[in-house]
Image (cartoon, rainbow, N blue to C red):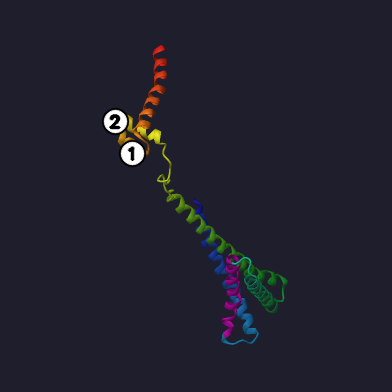
Amino acid sequence: MSISTALTTARRGTVFLSLVCFAISYIALADLARIAGLGPEAYLWPIMVDGTIVIGTVSVVALSQSRGAWSLLIAGAIVSIAGNAVHAWITHHSWISVGVALTPPIFLLWTTSVTVELGRRAEDTDQKADQDEHPEIPDPPDTSQMEIDPRSRALELIAAGGVPFREIARRVGVDDRTVRRWRDDAKQETEPESLVGVAT
């Protein structure tokens, strides 16, 4: 299984768990709101509370240094956890019920954070895969400004043949006598090598 597939599977799983935790917490908070005397808006109050956890988690991941994002997340988590705990105590008067009731808001906070982080990791993995498939081709070096040795260029033109000395001198920016001297010097440099080859 590739990393991208694993991240996608994990992200879908955490989204599903987040929805389950939200639904369980929603039922408890809505019932608590009805006990508190709220009317039809009792069904909206849990959305406000647990929705704040989701928005706060995403904001913290995106703006880790923002006090406002952390304050929003902490406030939503405290209200949701306290609300579920109070509802469990009022309805069942049992610490076991309180402990069970605390798991949905806590796991909602946890799974939402993991979901957001997995989404970020999946995007980074996709971008890395695109870069591997389509690597950037560096621009060829600009040789227009590179200096060419006039002597080497002149000798190349002489070796190619068909170009008069005056034309070669004009191309490399010297006079024809300099070109002839370069040719003679090059012959003298190659002659000892030829003699050595004959002697061996």
Is 135 located above or below residue 17 in the figure? above
Residue topped by disc 1:
170
Which residue is drawn at the image coordinates 40% and 25% (left, top)? 185
Q: Is residue 31 visible?
A: yes
Depth check, front residue: 150 or 93: 150
Q: Which amino acid does the dot numbered 1 rest on?
A: Arg
User: In the displayed structure, would residue 198 be above or below residue 105?
Assistant: above
Mark 1 → mark 2, Cα distance in angstroms? 16 Å
For this rendering, which residue is in front, 153 or 185? 185
Front position in the image: 20 or 178: 178
Q: Position of residue 49 (x, y in %)?
A: 61, 76
Amino acid type, residue under disc 2 in the picture: Gly
Residue at numbered disc 2 = 161
Quadrant for the C terminus, please: top left
Rendered position, 76 above or below 3: below
Left or right: 180, with 162 as reference point: right
Toward the top, the furthest residue is 199
State the residue at coordinates (49%, 53%): 128
Image position, residue 4 (x, y; %): 49, 54
Does the stretch in magenta take in 55? yes
